[in-house]
């Protein structure tokens, strides 16, 4: 039986995840019809994606870009819109499936808008779960929305969890490549430049998440993601460093069986899984060749050289708004590092100092709404900015 084309909306269409999503859609024109595409401020790239995918509407978050977008879409018949409200409306458009791939906390409101209309949401934006995970998962249950994890490790867990009953799961393991500094000494890491940190050994991703992979903060954020997505206790989530990035996630069941998902390190694999779910489509990524890889190795993560992983775990255990503050401080710290204002190891130090300052101000209570979470995010950013001066290089 041939099913009707699935209507899809792509939030963050011009980014790394967005481009992989568009690539898959273009290879499967009969299966998908694009409703809306949205981005932040890159007019040229958005107009190109909108034309390539024959989208009905293109939305740019920056209101000053409206005229330029309208001009770039002239003659295409594609509707142009701009501004934060238009972004939320794009998520509310009646598409069956929404890719939530805006980077950062700005993705919270549009993603929640898609969840509140009961859509199937492919969730790439990990900040939704880190900043307000309890609120998102509660809303998904309340509005009958389906949340499909795009992040490769969580997508792996989602697939492996299908092998048994939830109550028979003992623990899950997510893998980390270890990033470009896995084998570096602490002294060498201290001198690491943005250029070195932006060179990920296996994955091609946006700049923020690439730096987070070098500090292992990305893995810390992913532990928090797993905690909310699959209602796992902190003690049920482990991390293993696996430099080959072939095994993405493992689930250990009570009988001793460990079920893993493997695949090449290409985001089009988990994105394809989400796009077609519960069916499958052909994946264009180079196939996993285990004989060519030869060996798969695993090691414990080192939280002395990579303290961000410890900080994220502590924030998860503390709960409330601690992960929200962790995430906000990390965004500021990563931006300061990329701009050459603070050294690499100061990223984790700044996050830790911001958490302490926020705790001292009584800011770590559980946010009761997305607006409350965004308010904490806002204060944490300004705290982090204030504290970053003392860490300047
Ligand atoms: P990129 O930086 O490559 O892309 C970010 C996207 O968000 C762009 O389309 C950008 O638009 C858009 N954007 C930025 N600011 C705004 C705004 N204010 N309003 C609306 N849109 C905005 O990021 P990635 O694709 O790497 O990551 C996206 C999300 O997915 C992140 O949360 C990341 O953690 C997560 N993720 C990414 C993975 C990866 O492999 N890349 C893996 C797992 C998770 P513009 O181009 O106009 O600036
Ligand atoms: Mg990941």
Image (cartoon, helix red, strand yellow):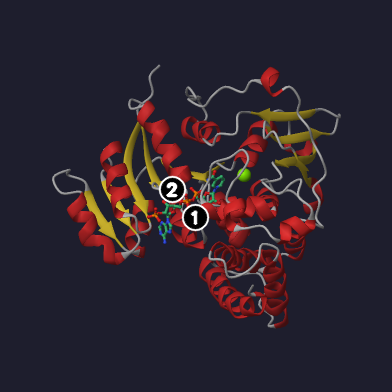
Is ligand 1 within 8 Å of the beta carbon of the residue shown at mark 2? yes
Residue 43 in sight: yes
Asked if the residues shown at circle 1 and circle 2 are in contact, with their CB atoms under 8 angstroms apart, the answer is yes
Image quarter hosting the N terminus: top left
Q: Which residue is drawn at the image coordinates 50% and 51% (left, top)?
A: 143
Circle 1 SS class? loop
Question: Which badge, 1 or 2, is on the more N-terminal residue?
Answer: 2
The percent coordinates of residue 130 (x first, y second) are 62, 58
For residue 136, which quarter of the picture? bottom right
The residues bearing labels 1 and 2 have C-alpha atoms spaced at a distance of 8 Å
* Number of the label disc, if any, that sits on residue 306: none
The percent coordinates of residue 377 (x first, y second) are 56, 70
For residue 355, which quarter of the picture? bottom right
Q: Is residue 75 above or below residue 207?
A: above
Is ligand 1 within 8 Å of the beta carbon of the residue shown at mark 1? yes
Does 247 sit left or right of 235 as displayed? left
Q: Which residue is mark 1?
A: 103
Does 191 sit left or right of 240 as displayed? left
For residue 177, which quarter of the picture? top right
The percent coordinates of residue 346 (x first, y second) are 68, 67
| Camera-side residue of 289 and 95 | 289
The percent coordinates of residue 78 (x first, y second) are 21, 46
Does 319 sit left or right of 134 as displayed? right
Does 290 sit left or right of 79 as displayed? right
Q: Residues within 10 Å of mark 1 (few under 14, many from 20)?
A: many
Residue that extends furthest to the bottom in the rendered view of this protein:
361
Residue 308 in sight: no
Q: Which residue is drawn at the image coordinates 29% and 50% (left, top)?
A: 44
Q: Which residue is mark 2?
A: 15
Q: Is residue 195 above or below residue 31?
A: below
Image quarter hosting the C terminus: bottom right
């Amino acid at each position: 039986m041939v099913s009707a084309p699935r209507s899809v909306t792509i939030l963050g269409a011009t980014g790394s995840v967005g481009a992989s999503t568009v690539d898959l859609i273009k290879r499967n024109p009969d299966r998908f019809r694009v409703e809306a595409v949205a981005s932040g401020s890159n007019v040229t790239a958005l107009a190109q994606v909108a034309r390539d995918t024959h989208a009905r509407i293109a939305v740019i978050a920056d209101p000053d870009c409206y005229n330029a977008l309208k001009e770039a879409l002239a003659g295409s018949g594609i509707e142009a819109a701009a501004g934060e409200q238009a972004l939320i409306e794009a998520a509310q458009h009646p598409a069956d499936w929404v890719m939530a791939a805006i980077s950062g906390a700005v993705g919270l409101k549009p993603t929640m808008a898609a969840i509140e209309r009961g859509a199937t949401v492919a969730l790439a934006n990990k900040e939704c779960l880190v900043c307000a995970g309890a609120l998102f998962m509660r809303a998904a249950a309340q509005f009958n929305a389906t949340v499909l994890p795009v992040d490769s490790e969580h997508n792996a867990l989602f697939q492996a969890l299908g092998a048994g009953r939830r109550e028979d799961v003992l623990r899950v393991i997510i893998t980390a490549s270890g990033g470009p500094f896995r084998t570096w000494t602490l002294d060498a890491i201290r001198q690491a430049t943005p250029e070195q940190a932006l060179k990920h050994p296996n994955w091609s991703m946006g700049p923020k998440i690439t730096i987070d992979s070098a500090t292992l903060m990305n893995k810390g954020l992913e532990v928090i993601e797993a905690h909310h997505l699959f209602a796992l206790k902190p003690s049920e989530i482990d991390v293993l460093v696996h430099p080959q990035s072939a095994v993405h996630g493992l689930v250990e069941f009570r009988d001793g069986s460990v079920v893993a998902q493997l695949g090449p390190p290409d985001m089009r694999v988990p994105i394809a899984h989400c796009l077609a779910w519960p069916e499958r489509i052909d994946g264009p990524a180079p196939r996993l060749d285990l004989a060519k890889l030869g060996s798969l190795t695993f090691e414990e993560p080192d939280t002395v050289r990579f303290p961000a992983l410890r900080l994220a775990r502590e924030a998860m255990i503390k709960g409330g708004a601690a992960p929200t503050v962790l995430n906000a401080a990390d965004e500021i710290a990563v931006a300061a590092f990329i701009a050459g204002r603070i050294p690499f190891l100061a990223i984790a130090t700044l996050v830790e100092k911001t958490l302490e300052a926020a705790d001292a101000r009584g800011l770590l209570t559980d946010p009761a709404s997305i607006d409350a979470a965004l308010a904490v995010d806002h204060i944490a950013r300004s705290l982090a900015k204030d504290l970053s001066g003392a860490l300047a290089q």
